[in-house]
Amino acid sequence: MKKVALLIVLVFSLTQVWAQEAKEKEKEDRNFRIPLIGETAPSFTAESTGGLINFPLDYGRKWKILFSHPQDFTPVCSSEILELANLQEEFDKLNVKLVVVSTDALDTHFAWKKAMEDVEFKGRVPSKIKFPLVDDSSIAISKQYGMIHPESNTTKSVRGVFVVDPDNVIQAIQFYPMSIGRNTDELIRTVQALQATAKTELMTPADWRAGNDLIAPVPPTADQRTENTPDGYYKLAWFMWYKKAK
């Protein structure tokens, strides 16, 4: 009897250990690392409404925006895609290519795209959606980019944005919950700011807009007297130097 009892205890203990290991493995599988600013954008190949794409290689020396959304045929996601479609010319002027990803299948993407192209969003004439909607029904891309947040949803990506420069390096990241639509004006402003400061040591102040003066992180002169301010610069305080945009 003692041997039987010991065997039962052993089996029970092993069962508990296996259950805990399975739970930890499931938790580990769901914790996908977010690629960080300064890192190379993870590459992927996937089917889309624009055909097979290889991201980011297909877009060469252009700026790229990877824009994820949780689900097709939902009102918040639809409003975002329609706003991006309306701004396609603005993104073209900035040499930016848009790539939209969701965990729905390709046939759903096609049906959703067709439906949205008939919507008079904000009273505007309907726009054709020229950027690809990528099939991530396997959630492989969402895993690569850390866009599955288990406490939010285990199968749908959050609203993620990755701005990638011509060297395929991530320069900006945004994450929003499923209930909050993103600000496309801020997305454009972010790209403009990144382009204005690229390859320089200059920075943009709060609420900067294209054409505004830029911040010089280091004083352009060791002499802090106002009368010795170098041409093209001015200061608000000894620790706040600006470079004139014009």
Image (tube, helix red, strand yellow):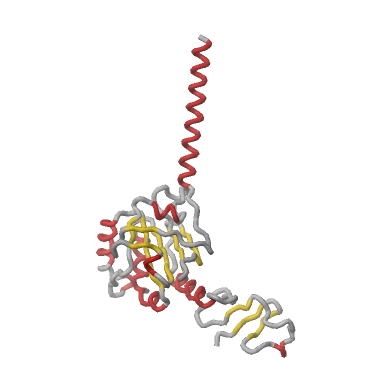
Q: Is residue 202 left or right of residue 158?
A: right
Q: Quarter of the image containing the C terminus?
A: bottom right
- Residue closer to the observer: 16 or 71: 16
Above or below 32: residue 161: below
Residue for point 41% across, 63% down: 67
- Residue closer to the observer: 33 or 80: 33
What percent of the width, then of the height, locates residue 165? 47, 69
Total numbered badges shown on the rendered structure = 0
Residue for point 28% across, 63% down: 51
What percent of the width, then of the height, locates residue 128? 28, 71
Q: Is residue 245 left or right of residue 179?
A: right
What percent of the width, then of the height, locates residue 168? 46, 66
- Residue closer to the observer: 43 or 137: 43
Residue for point 32% across, 54% down: 104
What percent of the width, then of the height, locates residue 222? 73, 81
> In the image as oriented, which residue stretches furthest toward the top?
1
Above or below 93: residue 69: above
